Image: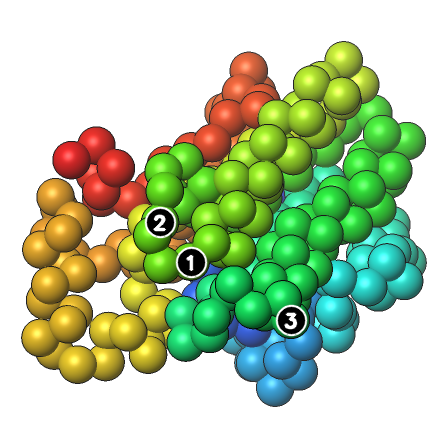
Amino acid sequence: MIKYDFDGKVAVVTGAASGIGRATALAFAASGAAVVVADMNESGGEETVARARAAGGRAVFQRCDVSSPAEAEALVARAVSEYGRLDFAHNNAGINSLAADEWELPNWQRSLAVNLTGVMLCMKAEAAVMLAQGKGAIVNTASINGLVGNPSQPAYTATKHAVVGLTRHGALRWARKGVRVNCVCPGVIDTPMVEGVSARPEIRKVIENMTPLGRFGKPEEVAAGVLWLCSDASSFVTGHPLVIDGGAIAD
């Protein structure tokens, strides 16, 4: 992974107790940024913090239900009170109800609350601080299911399409004010979220064969995209859905 110099910078990462969020939080910390690790999973979040600190980084944990306006605001307030500013945000928290019928209203509403409303609430709180500073970068986690259809998950597909749209809205709204907004669109990444599907070797092989590169992606490969989108190396990039999928939607 490219090493960025983020000394003196502060990042918030939601859904950072495992998977892509953890990899991003650790990558930020390794690059010198102070990180606020946010998740509902306290033990997983504290483990991410411990790993960041063990590697010489700075990190604290904040329990956060992103679908709660008060908790989203408290998360950003923690970053400012702990470290004095907020430069980067990775709004990664999300759910993928693979085992649930998303046509059932409670499942549909929960997906919207976390995957879409949670991103909006965090963006709103983060942007307020970044706009006052005159600079910042926000990266949302969408999905390749935010760019193409999925026949089995209506809520997940709808929310991820909406995250791409919300990203573009934020990019246009704040472009002249120093805040860039982009999103990453991962394909199948080897995270706890997909373990239930990929636990059987024969199923995993089928999924791998559906990806042109012939394997699952690694959380660190998505984290690399997030850090690039936050860095000055992407200073002319905003409103962009960065696809990280091993060629899946190019096939």
Which quarter of the rendered picture does the C terminus lie within? top left
Q: Are marks 2 and 3 in contact (CB under 8 Å)?
A: no
Q: Label 3, secondary structure: give it.
A: helix
User: How dense is the environment of label 2, judged by Cα within 10 Å: few (below 14), some, or many (20 and up)?
Assistant: some
Of mark 1 and mark 3, the one earlier in the sequence is: 3
Q: CA distance from mark 1 to mark 2?
A: 6 Å
Q: Are marks 1 and 3 in contact (CB under 8 Å)?
A: no
**What residue is shown with label 3?**
106
Please identify the quarter of the rendering in which residue 175 is found.
top right
In this picture, residue 213 sits left or right of residue 220: left
Q: Are marks 1 and 2 in contact (CB under 8 Å)?
A: yes
**What residue is shown with label 1?**
153
Please identify the quarter of the rendering in which residue 25 is found.
bottom right
Residue 137 is at least partly visible in this image? yes
Seen as rendered, the residue at the extreme bottom is: 43
In this picture, residue 212 sits left or right of residue 110: left
- Badge number at residue 150: 2
Residue 16 is at least partly visible in this image? no
- Badge number at residue 86: none
User: How dense is the environment of label 1, judged by Cα within 10 Å: few (below 14), some, or many (20 and up)?
Assistant: some
142 over 241 or under it: above or below: below
Nearest the eye: 45 or 211: 211
Give the image location of residue 3, x and y in percent: 44, 43
Q: Amino acid at mark 3?
A: Pro
Give the image location of residue 109, x and y in percent: 66, 63
Q: Label 2, secondary structure: give it.
A: loop
The residue depicted at 72 percent of the width and 33 percent of the height is 136
